[in-house]
Image (cartoon, rainbow, N blue to C red):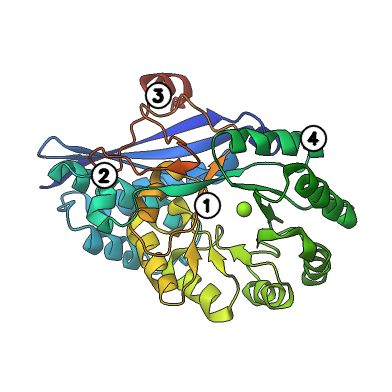
């Protein structure tokens, strides 16, 4: 088989609440990988808030597509290595890895379609379903809105819910967690996410103040660039720390693990290097008994979680658009099952393509 054409496009999907409180829309940079055998793989990468989307598409068109046209798309490992090693100028964080991830995701889709098997079978089927954690509770939300959102997830069978820390009045955050815990009771696990907003001292102060709230994890305490500071927080507080959504490739995750930065790792399949690299990251973490709970993108992350021994939770964001996929990810009794469709199993609806594709 040969890659004959890769067609790129930009799909801008408006956000509803709670994400619209931060970002009006997310942008998907899409790469349709076509072959001489008539099969097509759907690759895509998502830029939250659309930031950098134009640069990712340009990098794809100028630096990656010319490199892989004419290649055998089933040699995914070799293509991944060449995408990674061909560019000796840019460090592989940010734009280049978003672009590589899109291609890798499209190649796995193509491989699955070529043998009529779902990607999670090809990755090493392991788990039939994974518990979902509901995610939301953005900073403008009142405690009542947070509790209502959590109860919505509980009604779908979910036992884990995450909301945001980071309001300016530091102790107000502690009070909000106490109120949410009191309202939800003890049979719901609560996860909190600081989104890199605080310094080490503030995180340790908040972490200590929350010690009796029985929290499941404390996410992204400090700027993602400061791995040693994340490790400092993880060592100082009794709540398990989670991080990694802003890290790239196995090299970045090696540094997180070496530093002891977290007990849970949150790779993002669009940022870390696609299916190929997320599997490497998961296996590296497995050697340390560190669990994987990917950042967002449940429709693809679920195929990795289904194929690894150290799967933790799959994240479902409140208000995710329900008109994007022909068959979207589904919560059944608090769990998500990987799709039993060839490839990664995702196809944009005609409506999404019509309404959200940017004209250029
Ligand atoms: Mg987060």
**165 with respect to 79 (left or right):** right
Question: Which label's residue is closer to the chain start, 3 or 1?
Answer: 1
Q: Depth-wise, is mark 3 or mark 1 nearer the camera?
A: 1
Ligand 1 contact, mark 1 (Cβ < 8 Å): yes
Badge 1 is on which residue?
Answer: 295
- As helix, strand or loop, the secondary structure at mark 3 comes to helix
- As helix, strand or loop, the secondary structure at mark 4 comes to helix
Q: Position of residue 235 (x, y in %)?
A: 68, 78
Question: Which label's residue is closer to the chain start, 3 or 2?
Answer: 2
Q: Which mark is residue 144?
A: 4
Distance (Cα) linking label 3 and label 2: 19 Å
Q: Depth-wise, is mark 4 or mark 1 nearer the camera?
A: 4
Q: Depth-wise, is mark 2 or mark 4 nearer the camera?
A: 4
Question: Which label's residue is closer to the chain start, 4 or 1?
Answer: 4
Give the quadrant of residue 244: bottom right
Q: Position of residue 57 (x, y in %)?
A: 42, 43
Question: Which label's residue is closer to the chain start, 2 or 4?
Answer: 2
Badge 3 is on which residue?
Answer: 353
């Amino acid at each position: 088989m040969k890659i004959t054409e890769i067609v790129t496009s930009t799909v801008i999907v408006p956000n509803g609440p709670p994400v619209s409180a931060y970002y009006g829309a997310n942008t998907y940079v899409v790469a349709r990988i076509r072959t001489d055998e008539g099969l097509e793989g759907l690759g895509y990468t998502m830029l939250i808030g659309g930031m950098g989307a134009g640069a990712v598409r340009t990098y794809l068109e100028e630096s990656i597509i010319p490199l892989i046209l004419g290649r055998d798309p089933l040699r995914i490992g070799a293509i991944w290595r060449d995408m990674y090693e061909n560019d000796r100028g840019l460090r592989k964080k940010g734009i280049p890895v978003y672009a590589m991830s899109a291609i890798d995701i499209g190649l796995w889709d193509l491989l699955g379609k070529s043998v009529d098997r779902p990607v999670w079978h090809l990755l090493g089927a392991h788990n039939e379903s994974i518990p979902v954690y509901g995610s939301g509770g953005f900073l403008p939300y009142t405690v009542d809105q947070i509790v209502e959102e959590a109860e919505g997830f509980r009604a779908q069978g979910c036992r884990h819910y995450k909301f945001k820390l980071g309001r300016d009045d530091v102790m107000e955050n502690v009070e909000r967690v106490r109120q949410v815990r009191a309202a939800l009771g003890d049979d719901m696990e609560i996860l909190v996410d600081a989104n890199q907003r605080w310094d080490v001292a503030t995180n340790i102060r908040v972490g200590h103040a929350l010690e009796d709230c029985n929290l499941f994890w404390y996410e992204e305490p400090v700027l993602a660039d400061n791995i040693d500071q994340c490790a400092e927080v993880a060592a100082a507080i009794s709540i398990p720390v989670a991080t990694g959504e802003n890290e790239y490739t196995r090299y970045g995750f090696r540094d997180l693990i070496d530093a002891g930065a977290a007990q849970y790792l949150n790779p993002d399949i669009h940022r870390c290097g696609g299916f190929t690299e997320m599997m490497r990251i998961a296996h590296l973490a497995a050697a340390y008994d560190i669990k994987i709970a990917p950042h967002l993108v449940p429709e693809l992350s679920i195929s990795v979680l289904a194929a690894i021994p150290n799967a933790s939770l799959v994240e479902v964001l409140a208000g995710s658009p329900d008109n994007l996929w022909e068959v979207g990810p589904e919560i059944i009794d608090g769990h998500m099952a990987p799709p039993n469709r060839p490839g990664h199993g995702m196809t944009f609806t005609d409506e999404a393509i019509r309404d959200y594709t940017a004209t250029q």
